[in-house]
Image (tube, grey):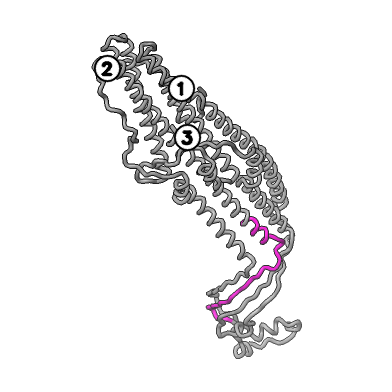
Amino acid sequence: MRITPVAVFTCWAMMLAPASASANDTTSNDATRAPLSTESPLHVQHPVSFLDAWYIVQNQNDGLAAERANVERSQNLQDAARDLYLPSISATAKYTRLDKPVEIKPSDLIDSMPIGSRLPSLPVLDQFFTSQLTKREVFTSSIRAVWPIFTGGRITAAQDIAKGQTEEASQLLAMKQQATFEDLSKFYFGVALSQQVLDTRIEVENGLRKHFERAQKLEQQGQIAKVERLQAQASYDKARVERQKAERDTEIAQVALTKLLKADVPAMPTSSLFVNESLPPMSAFIDKTLAGYPGLQLLDAKKKQAQGLMAAEKGKYYPEVYLYGNYNLHEDDTLAAKTAPDWAVGVGVNIPLLDSSGRSGKVKAAHSAVTQVNYLRAQAEQDLTVLVEKTYREAMQSLEEYNGLASSLDLAKENVSLREKAFSQGLSTSLDVVDAELYLASVKTQRAAAAYQYVISLTRLLAVSSEMNSFKQYQQYQGLEVQS
């Protein structure tokens, strides 16, 4: 029997070994045990289909909510980058206290003239004609506006970077959705698989119980030896232990699913394991993956940011051209205030001659970042192709295993019936009957594990190819339900 790689279910393979434990005689004489109920050990449950579970996860998962918040943050930053083309307008107010008032005297004017040194000094004029330009306490307020006209492409580059960051956040959300879809599939159908294993263990226990009861009657009639009855009783007790273990495994699997769905009561899947008769060709999944996998689009967004950064650094070599204006809101009752203009407008140019920010090195670094992203994308495409091929072949292998075990299942069922009849006629031993029951259980469990592995591989294929919405088609319209 092939051992499934799903670690959480490896313990079930141990259930398939023939029972060898023995029990005491007081238990062996109990021939009136009631048949085991097929109800789950968790009595209060919340039935949910896979599609309903996926809807719940999309709306309530905290990880997805965090990625949506990151997208909103990036969108707000992108909106903020659009404002870079708008003028910057500010209102300012200043209060200044001087050590003394600013005054102008006639002697100061005479001294400032080219011939002032030749003219006689007239102190009397300073006494009567001194003018005060400003007071000792000066208060000014104004509105100033600066409007960039040309920035060497730096504003456009900043907006491209912000757009790339938004696209990156969106692709991170899409990747998180794909990963969550795969996780839900593992948890959900893991419970479905554990329930099928539990049903199989219940069938084994009920079958071995009937065999044990028949062995007791045959021993009482002297048709079989005591060792045959002991073998039947030990196998039955072992089957009860394995059934109880399967119940615990089902409870554990349900706990994980219930926590993922944030349900108040244990969640019970209503969608069974399924298989499909066939799958689309591998090339279809590869083409869709390479065309729409969010990880590749995330790298494209990274490339756009690197290109924007390179354009921004190159823009530092160009001059800046801007319009500016100033309007005085308040003026003091002084000569300087009265002679100053109320408003002023103009055009400014800022030409960088020597820059200490290392713009040349940053341009080269941005170019290297673009080259790095190109190589990463090529490697990612190669890795994705390998992943899709590997997953596709695993799905086909699981499908082949499931279909290939159909004849083994028919043989196992017929073998159980024949061994029971032969044991009743004294032509077969109790060990033959037990082996037949356990072989039937092993075939059923192996087929269920193959179906589980097929579903997991299918969901991974649909996730990486961004075709999660088509899961319903594979499950409900084309799926063949797997029965325990």
Quadrant of residue 385 within the rendered picture: top right
Residue 241 appears anywhere in the view: no
- Residue 155 highlighted magenta (yes or no): yes
The residue sitting at 39% across, 31% down in the picture is 199
Tag 1 residue: 412
Which of marks 2 and 3 precedes in the sequence?
2
Left or right placement of residue 15 versus residue 151 in this view: left
- Residue 204 highlighted magenta (yes or no): no
Tag 2 residue: 28
Q: Which quadrant of the rendered structure holds the C terminus?
A: top left
Tag 3 residue: 482
Q: Which residues are magenta?
A: 134-162
Amino acid identity at mark 3: Val
Quadrant of residue 382 within the rendered picture: top right
Tell me: residue 131, above or below residue 409: below
Q: Residues within 10 Å of mark 1 (few under 14, many from 20)?
A: many
Left or right placement of residue 209 versus residue 270 in this view: left
